[in-house]
Amino acid sequence: STAADILKQGAACNVLYLNSVETESLTGPKAVSKATKYTLSLNPRPAATVVHFKVSAQGITLTDNKRSIFFNQAKIIYEVFKCANAIRLFFRRHYPISSVTFSSLDPQDQRWISSDSTPSKIFGFVARRTGSSTENVCHLFAEMDPEQPAVAIVNFINKVMLG
């Protein structure tokens, strides 16, 4: 397939979902930095979850690879537990292209240390909160596969979505 076909169809890979952090009106590298600093300061740190990360001309779609029965009603369950900050998992979430405002690696190049002690680059994207034109949320991830490095994922997001 040609590069144009890939841009049109989109591309997908598995990554580790780390956290989603409200950044109010903050966007750009400062939002990614703030979200990373906050996430790495949590004790205990959030449990990383493997998600299928797809980028296309329609936006970014995240799918929880475990697809637990508990999350059949994922949107409702996610919203209920998000308030209590007890669970950050989901079955599938879609962020339309119009809601994504920024994507980058962590500006301080901090790493996520996985359970096997492997350091992985952290990256994130900033999207407007549903129903808001001023409130943003930064979604953080860590690379999983050397064949799909964080820098390549960010470059693809920026090429497809942000021009």
Image: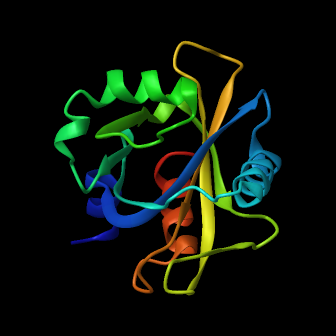
Q: Position of residue 141 (x, y in %)?
A: 54, 60
Is residue 102 found left or right of 56 in the rendered image?
A: right
Q: Residue at x 43, y 32 (%)?
A: 96
Q: Quadrant of residue 135?
A: top right
Q: Position of residue 138 (x, y in %)?
A: 64, 42
Q: Quadrant of residue 71?
A: top left
Is residue 78 found left or right of 33 in the rendered image?
A: left
In the rendered image, the vertical position of residue 145 relative to residue 22, given as above or below:
below
In the rendered image, the vertical position of residue 123 relative to residue 113, given as above or below:
above
In the rendered image, the vertical position of residue 131 relative to residue 28, given as above or below:
above
Is residue 161 found left or right of 89 in the rendered image?
A: right
Q: Residue at x 58, y 24 (%)?
A: 129
In the rendered image, the vertical position of residue 36 relative to residue 144, given as above or below:
above
Q: Position of residue 158 (x, y in %)?
A: 56, 55
Q: Residue at x 67, y 30 (%)?
A: 136
Q: Is residue 163 visible?
A: no
Pick the front one: 1 or 99 = 99
Q: Residue at x 46, y 35 (%)?
A: 97
In which quadrant will I find the N terminus? bottom left
